Amino acid sequence: MPEETHFGFSRVPLQDKQARVDDVFHKVASRYDLMNDLMSAGLHRVWKDIFAAKVKPSRQARFRHLDVAGGTGDIAFRVAKAGSRQTEITVLDINADMLEVGRERASKRNFPAHLEFIEANAEDLPFADDSFDAYTIAFGIRNVPRIDKALSEALRVLKRGGRFLCLEFSNVNVPGLAKLYEAYSFHAIPRLGQLVTGDADSYRYLVESIARFPEAESFREMIAGAGFERAAFTRLSGGIVAIHSGWKL
């Protein structure tokens, strides 16, 4: 039998998952940022500010940053604003529609940093070993079919002393909040997706993918198992999201 994986709460052949994920993001690309604002009541901006601030691009030396699954540019733009003319940022995404949104947004801004947008797969990065000073992935790793391969690739392309940073939905750990959050996620978000984008199914998948993602400690262990040192995480907003990190030492 062919190897299977989960797609939300469904089981699908492993080789089919990426195409299904791509289809979801093709459908939601044009309203992706608006829906993020509506779904999180703007909180995603605070989470991303905290997350991107951890990159700390050098302002005195060349600094190469890779943002994976970052098509619309939200993280890259924050790092670019903090960087200098010696900061080089590569935004990588497997979805061409998301990248096009990012390019259009970037063209309206004037950053000191150099930005480029590349269509490629997180499981097979088109870069040499030891290429980047920092690697970020925000709300993307749970959509990767083979998370272990993505982590391995992240380790490979980072320089010694480079940092891996991942912002992802996590497990709520505040009494009472968990049930409220679950009810909101499974009932309100698909309806909101239908109202704003005409597509409830894509947002139902996104909610299910959050529920299926490993809890914070388990994912920390995956990061450490991939070879990163000092793997750790910090919960935000009662555990709705967590920032995971590790170092290539």
Image (cartoon, grey):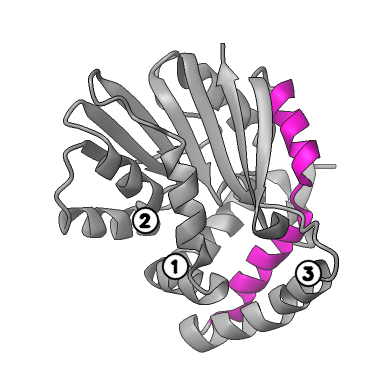
Q: Earlier in the sequence, mark 2 or mark 1?
A: 1
Q: Residues within 10 Å of mark 1 (few under 14, many from 20)?
A: some
Is residue 117 visible from the viewing direction of this image?
no
* Residue toward you, 113 or 190: 113
Q: Secondary structure at mark 2?
A: loop
Pointer 1 residue: 32
Amino acid type, residue under disc 2 in the picture:
Thr
* Residue toward you, 201 or 135: 135
Say which quadrant the C terminus sits in.
top right
Q: Quadrant of residue 113?
A: top left
Are circles 2 and 1 on residues that touch, CB within 8 Å? Answer: yes
Q: Is residue 15 left or right of residue 70?
A: right
Q: The magenta stretch spans which residues?
A: 199-225
Instruction: Count how many numbered circles sit on residues in the image.
Output: 3
Residue at image location 51% in from the left, 42% down from the top: 137
Q: Is residue 24 left or right of residue 70?
A: right
Residue 23, given in percent of the width and then of the height, sits at 52, 62
Q: Earlier in the sequence, mark 3 or mark 2?
A: 2
Pointer 2 residue: 72
The relative height of residue 207 versus residue 47 in the rendered view (above or below) is below
Residue 37, given in percent of the width and then of the height, sits at 47, 72
For marks 2 and 1, give the CA distance. 8 Å
* Residue toward you, 204 or 80: 80
Is residue 75 visible from the viewing direction of this image?
yes
Amino acid type, residue under disc 1 in the picture:
Tyr
Q: Which mark is residue 177?
A: 3
Q: Earlier in the sequence, mark 3 or mark 1?
A: 1
Residue at image location 25% in from the left, 29% down from the top: 87
